């Protein structure tokens, strides 16, 4: 064995550098291992990868004007996300920020307008703010405790806070009070009222508002408030994202195949699949389930002038399904007029069938598919004097002159055919449920909700339930229009039936 002294100076230099690099690596690894052993593990695991759609915890920030809501937002995001100004009513609309809290995962933050702003504009802002309460998982009520005292030193009624609290508790949200302390004012208050008086004031406000449990008290103008807010949120967070699986477990597995029927028309975007289709593929692959994407030719399958063309398209579909022997067919809802009869073939009778719209509404509405199934019962007692609302969450222009849009053409035509041309229909498009009086409607027909988050879809469903208005879904309705057998077939994978 050669000693270092027998090596050339160059060789010794190389060896020295390699040894030093190895020693550094060992120290680094030891440091990482030691850190992981000594550090406490995360309190909550981050949500699993969402693939096509990232689930987020929604955190809403509420309170009166100038209470410190926007400052709270800026502290938790560590940046000037919201405009802060002493002028009351600075926040004119809901401000949204996306970020990651490491022990929680992806979150969406909402900074809202002051609850106590007066006038017509103030009422409009308040309505929008209360809608955010419905979509929040965690509700922070920011209070300036010293501003809660009037000139005569009597406590305020906290009516606006109680309104938020009542709605949040009814919708089963977590609510926490945040006292925005101003250090100088706090010192002056205790000097005037005695030691400990400030703490008693905070307890009194908690009792007046009606929020039990822990609260957060801090000076939001201080830099250290950022860590305090994050630590408090992580400590009191309960895992809200109980995500409902996209498809039933019975159709998943290494020996299973999900057959996706994806017809395309003029409204189909180029270069990508629609979100429900992409989500289905990602979900199946994540669960070791093979997927097959098939494009049905709706025009050929509906050809009334040439029986041969229509039959050839049926045979092509049946052959494709027979070869694959899928555990489930998921089809675009508008193809139910073909998929339903074509899967009643003796060789296809046992093939499970559902639609992307049904799949999505179950997923986005927290597994409450039965609510939408029960909504179909309203079709048995339609009153032509009352309106039906067709709600579609996605934003795109409807190309009705060259294709039959589901929401504006297909469903209205079928409703008119069933109930007469004078049936009253209205539409609501986009990601905001408009400020409508739901009691004006006898039924709400909703799309799959794939372009909004689960919290927003749940809020819409709960709005309808609280108003006593039945709500159903595009896929369920189109299956219902096809036949009782078709409806029963698309519900079977979910273990449901219509009474």
Image: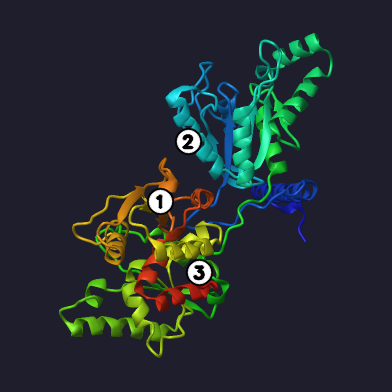
Q: Secondary structure at mark 3?
A: helix
Q: Nearer the viewer, mark 2 or mark 1?
A: 1
Which residue occupies the foreground of this view, 362 or 222? 362
Ranked by sequence position, the earlier of labels 1 and 3 is 3
Q: Secondary structure at mark 2?
A: helix
> Which numbered marker is on residue 441?
1
Q: Nearer the viewer, mark 1 or mark 3?
A: 1
Left or right of 233? Residue 413 is left
Q: Secondary structure at mark 1?
A: strand
Which residue occupies the foreground of this view, 45 or 321? 321
Graded by Cα atoms within 10 Å as few (under 14), some (14 to 19) or many (20 or more), the crowding at tag 3 reads: many
Residue carrying label 3: 284
Q: Residue furthest right?
A: 195
Image coords of residue 176 (percent x, y) = 68, 36
Residue carrying label 2: 128
Q: Residue at x 41, y 90 (%)?
A: 347
């Amino acid at each position: 064995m050669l000693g270092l002294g027998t090596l050339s100076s160059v060789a010794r230099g190389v060896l020295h550098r390699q040894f030093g690099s190895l020693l550094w690596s060992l120290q680094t690894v030891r440091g990482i291992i030691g850190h992981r052993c000594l550090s406490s593990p995360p309190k909550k695991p981050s949500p699993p990868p969402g693939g096509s759609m990232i689930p987020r915890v929604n955190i809403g920030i509420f309170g009166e004007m100038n209470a410190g809501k926007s400052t709270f937002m800026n502290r938790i995001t560590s940046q000037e996300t919201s405009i802060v100004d002493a002028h009351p009513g600075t926040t004119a609309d809901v401000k949204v920020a996306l970020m990651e809290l490491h022990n929680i995962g992806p979150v969406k933050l909402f900074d809202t307008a002051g609850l106590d702003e007066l006038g017509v504009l103030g009422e409009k802002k308040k309505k929008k703010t209360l809608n955010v309460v419905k979509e929040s998982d965690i509700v922070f009520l920011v209070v300036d405790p010293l501003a809660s005292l009037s000139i005569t030193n009597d406590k305020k009624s906290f009516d606006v806070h109680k309104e938020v609290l009542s709605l949040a508790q009814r919708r089963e949200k977590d609510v926490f009070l945040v006292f925005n302390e101003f250090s100088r004012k706090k010192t002056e208050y205790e000097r005037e009222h005695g030691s400990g008086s400030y703490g008693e004031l905070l307890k009194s406000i908690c009792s007046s508002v009606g929020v039990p449990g822990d609260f957060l008290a801090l000076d939001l103008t201080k830099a250290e408030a950022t860590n305090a807010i994050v630590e408090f949120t992580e400590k009191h967070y309960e895992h809200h994202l109980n995500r409902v699986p996209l498809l039933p477990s019975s159709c998943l597995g290494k020996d299973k195949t999900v057959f996706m029927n994806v017809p395309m028309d003029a409204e189909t975007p180029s270069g990508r699949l629609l979100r429900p289709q992409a989500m289905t593929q990602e979900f199946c692959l994540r669960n070791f389930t093979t997927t097959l994407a098939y494009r049905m030719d709706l025009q050929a399958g509906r050809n009334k002038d040439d029986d041969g063309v229509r039959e050839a398209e049926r045979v092509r579909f049946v052959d494709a399904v027979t070869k694959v022997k899928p555990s489930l067919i998921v089809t675009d809802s508008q193809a139910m007029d073909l998929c339903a009869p074509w899967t009643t073939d003796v060789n296809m009778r046992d093939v499970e069938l559902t639609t992307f719209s049904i799949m999505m509404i179950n997923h986005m509405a927290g597994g409450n598919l039965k609510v939408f199934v029960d909504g179909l019962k309203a079709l048995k007692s339609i009153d032509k004097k009352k309106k039906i609302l067709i709600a579609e969450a996605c934003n795109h222009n409807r190309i009705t002159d060259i294709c039959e849009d589901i929401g504006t053409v297909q469903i209205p035509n079928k409703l008119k055919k069933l109930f007469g041309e004078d049936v009253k229909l209205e539409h609501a498009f986009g990601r905001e449920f408009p400020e409508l009086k739901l009691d004006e409607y006898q039924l709400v027909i909703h799309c799959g909700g794939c372009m909004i988050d689960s919290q927003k879809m749940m809020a819409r469903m709960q709005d309808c339930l609280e108003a006593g208005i039945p709500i159903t879904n595009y896929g369920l309705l189109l299956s219902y229009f096809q036949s009782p057998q078709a409806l029963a077939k698309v519900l079977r994978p979910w273990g449901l039936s219509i009474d």
